[in-house]
Amino acid sequence: MKNKICTGCKEEKPVSDYYIQRIGTKGQPVYAAACKICLSDKAKEKWSSLTKEDKLKRGRMSRERIGEDYYKNYRLQARYGITLEEYNSMLDSQNSLCYLCETPFDEDNKAQVDHDHKTGKIRKLLCRSCNTAIGHMKEDIDVLKKSIKYIEEHSL
C-alpha cells in the first residue's frame, strides 16, 4: 500500500487515510491532499454554513483572479488530462454541436467531455442530456441496444 504526506498535519500516512477525489485519466484514484482527519467535521461545517450565493461568489472571485481560460484549462487537465486548446479543437471539429443529437452548444447548453470511466479515454463532446443518458445506462452497450429496440417497438 502506498503512503502519502498530508498537507494538513505533515505526517506520512497510508492512502487509505485519504478521501478519493476522483479517478484519474489512467483509471487510478486521485487522493485528497489532506488526510480525512485534517478534513474534519469542523472544516465541513464551516463550508456548509456558507450560503449557496457565498459559495458561487468564491468560485467567481477565484476565476476572475486567475482568469477564466486559465481556470478552464486547469479543470480540463485535472479532470480529463486535456488542455483548453485540445478541448477547443474538439469543439471546432464538431462545429460546436453535440456529437450525438447535434444540438448546438451555447451558454445554456455547454459541451460536456465524454470519456470512458474505465480507461479514462476521451471520446467526444456531448450535451448534458446525451452525456447523462449514457451515464445512467452505465455505458452498457447491451442496455443501450435494448433501449433503442424498446423505443422502436413503442413508437407510433
Image (cartoon, rainbow, N blue to C red):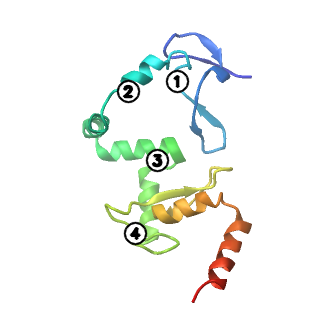
Q: Position of residue 102 (x, y in %)?
A: 46, 75
- Of the numbered discs 4 and 3, the one sitting upstream in the chain is 3
Alpha carbon distance from label 4 to label 3: 17 Å
Q: Position of residue 60 (x, y in %)?
A: 27, 40
Labels 4 and 1 touching (C-beta < 8 A): no
Q: Residues within 10 Å of mark 3 (few under 14, many from 20)?
A: some
Task: Name the residue located 39 percent from the left edge and 60 percent from the top edge.
Answer: 110
- Of the numbered discs 1 and 2, the one sitting upstream in the chain is 1
Q: Nearer the viewer, residue 117 or 85?
A: 117
Q: Amino acid at mark 1?
A: Ala
Vertical placement of 29 versus 11: above or below? below
In which quadrant of the rendered image does the N terminus lie?
top right
Q: Residues within 10 Å of mark 2 (few under 14, many from 20)?
A: few
Q: Position of residue 32 (x, y in %)?
A: 54, 27
Q: Which residue is mark 4?
A: 96
Examine the rendering and report whether any part of residue 109 can be seen: yes
Between tags 2 and 3, which lies in front?
2
User: Which quadrant of the view contains residue 121?
Assistant: bottom right
Q: Residue furthest bottom?
A: 156
Q: Which mark is residue 47?
A: 2
Q: Position of residue 63 (x, y in %)?
A: 30, 40
Vertical placement of 46 versus 155: above or below? above
Examine the rendering and report whether any part of residue 124 can be seen: no
Q: Amino acid at mark 3?
A: Leu
Alpha carbon distance from label 1 to label 3: 19 Å
Alpha carbon distance from label 2 to label 4: 36 Å
Which secondary structure, mark 3? helix
In which quadrant of the rendered image does the C terminus lie?
bottom right
Q: Which mark is residue 76?
A: 3
